[in-house]
Image (cartoon, rainbow, N blue to C red):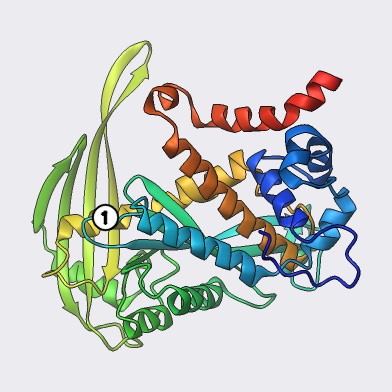
Amino acid sequence: MEALTDHRQKPEIPAAVFPKALLMLWLCRLRSFNALHLVGRRGAGRRFLRHAMPSADQMAANSELLDLSEMRAILGRMYKRLVRNKVLLPLRGHRLAVVDGHEINCSYDRCCPQCQQRELTVNGQKRIQYYHRAVVFQLVGPGFRFLLDFELLLPHDDEGSAALRLIQRVLTTYPRCFDILLGDGLYPQARLFKLLRRHGKHALVVLKDERRDVLKDARGLFGPKPHRTFRVGPTAYQCWDVEDLDSWDSFSEKVRVVRSLETTTVTQRKNRRKVQRQQTSEWVWVTTLPAAEVPTASVVLFGHERWRIENEGFNELCNHWHANHYFHHHPTSITALWLMLFIAHALFYCFLRNLKPCRRQGLPVYIWALLILAEFMAPLMSSA
Ligand SMILES: [Zn+2]
């Protein structure tokens, strides 16, 4: 944090105070810069900053000037430490990464020059809605996941273009951080597959557009009998696996399509009685992974790891870390806050990992978040 560059002419407050204050904002899971100003005035907050807490206006103005490349470098150093300490491990011998898009917030009134916009009909009237959307890159390992980078969409960007910039930056900076990239139904794009193959990486993405030739061809080859069946816990898997499909015109390599029909027996309560019901879901993925290297069951397992970014990424960040609003509506500020959120998120889970198991057991994660806030708030409560 001390190394972050200060671009201001005559700084009244040392540059290192601002990123530290942002880290405190996320560790305490506060909703605004005003709340941060209150919590950081004295006690643990003041000791943590080694300086008086800047006002909400100072925080907002300075968040526009933060050096994003240096914040990304902090995340890079954390990534390397997590790998060295064997916290972030491969899954079945492969390093997995997930890329996905997320809409942060929207408004009819407030906008900035970088806002994306769309026309909506509200009560019969056409209105322009302004919003920001971003793409997030997450590394996924057994027992730990790490949010590594973030890219805000430009005003006329589509998610694929922003994802391409993000993946290109990650590949340049950390060429060995992943082998397989996972993505949802928006990512079977030739430009993404070509970029990954140029760097010797593989793609494994959801294929759900029934109009695509490669899916039509694969469905014709699947046949009625599954190629592989297996069971994991309460779920029975019937899988079809077809290789060497060349019907993707814009991508010259042959691809593989895997279909998984998954049946899970769930117990539900109906009229005070337990009733067992079967739920079936179908998944289809397209991948460049060769069958000789990665068997069908591993493709299905990896494919489902994509949900980590939905369940343990965006849902958690928005519902428990208050990331679904703008602390300050400015593109640099939004990116800086999300990058600092990734740092705080990783620190928090490393802290939980290092707790003695006897202390960790039985307490939900949010209790530890409340305890951190209480530590900062205690001096304020005692003086009230
Ligand atoms: Zn904006």
Tell me the amino acid under the disc marked 1: Leu
Left or right: 233 as drawn, with respect to 228: right
- Front-lying residue, 337 or 207: 337
Q: Is mark 1 within 8 Å of ligand 1?
A: no
Q: Residues within 10 Å of mark 1 (few under 14, many from 20)?
A: some
In this rendering, the answer to whether 87 lies above or below 186 is: above
The residue drawn where x is 21% and y is 34% is 234
Q: Quarter-wise, where is residue 330 in the image?
A: bottom right
Quadrant assignment for the N terminus: bottom right
- Front-lying residue, 307 or 377: 377
Left or right: 249 as drawn, with respect to 17: left
Q: Position of residue 336 (x, y in %)?
A: 68, 62
**Residue 109 in view:** no
The residue drawn where x is 28% and y is 20% is 275
Q: Position of residue 136 (x, y in %)?
A: 53, 62
- Front-lying residue, 215 or 96: 96
Give the residue pinned by disc 1: 91
**Residue 44 in view:** yes
Q: Quadrant of ligand 1?
A: bottom right
Left or right: 233 as drawn, with respect to 1: left
Callout 1: helix, strand or loop?
loop
Q: Position of residue 25 (x, y in %)?
A: 71, 45
